[in-house]
Image: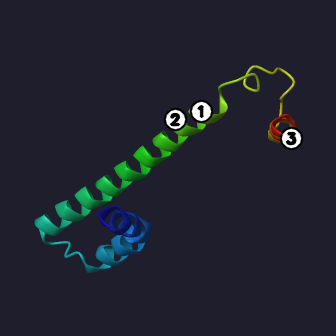
Amino acid sequence: MLANFLQRLIKWMPLILLLLLFMVDRDNTFQKIGYIILLFSYTGVLILRILYAKKDWHKEFSTGDLAKDSKIDKMSDYEGRLGNKNDSDKESVE
């Protein structure tokens, strides 16, 4: 429940930050500091999500013989190799 709420909050945060930007009283130091802290917090969450996705990607796809294949130059070559590997896995199961 809390995780679902946090995901929705992160999803809508750009709009919230935009609305707060228009509503912040620029003479009030507390509101300016609060807005900047909220903005940096959201930026930090985005950076952490990107770094986690990068780590997860490398953990998932860099293991095995596909990562060491020198014939893969483009993403389409990689997709073709993955397709061939998945097809051979299906045949070996049957």
**Residue drawn at (43%, 46%) of the image:** 47
Mark 3 crowd level (few <14, some 14–19, many ≥20, 10 Å Cα): few
Is 35 left or right of 81, judged from the image as shown?
left
Q: CA distance from mark 3 to mark 1?
A: 22 Å
Residue 21 placed where, x, y %? 31, 73
Number of the label disc, if any, that sits on residue 55: 2
- Viewer-closest of 24 and 43: 43
**Residue drawn at (12%, 65%) of the image:** 29
Q: Earlier in the sequence, mark 3 or mark 1?
A: 1
Residue 36 placed where, x, y %? 26, 59
Does residue 8 sit above or below 48 in this rendering?
below
The answer to which quarter of the image holds residue 31 is bottom left
Residue contact at pointers 1 and 2, CB within 8 angstroms: yes
Q: Secondary structure at mark 3?
A: helix
The answer to which quarter of the image holds residue 14 is bottom left
- Viewer-closest of 34 and 52: 52
**Residue drawn at (87%, 24%) of the image:** 71
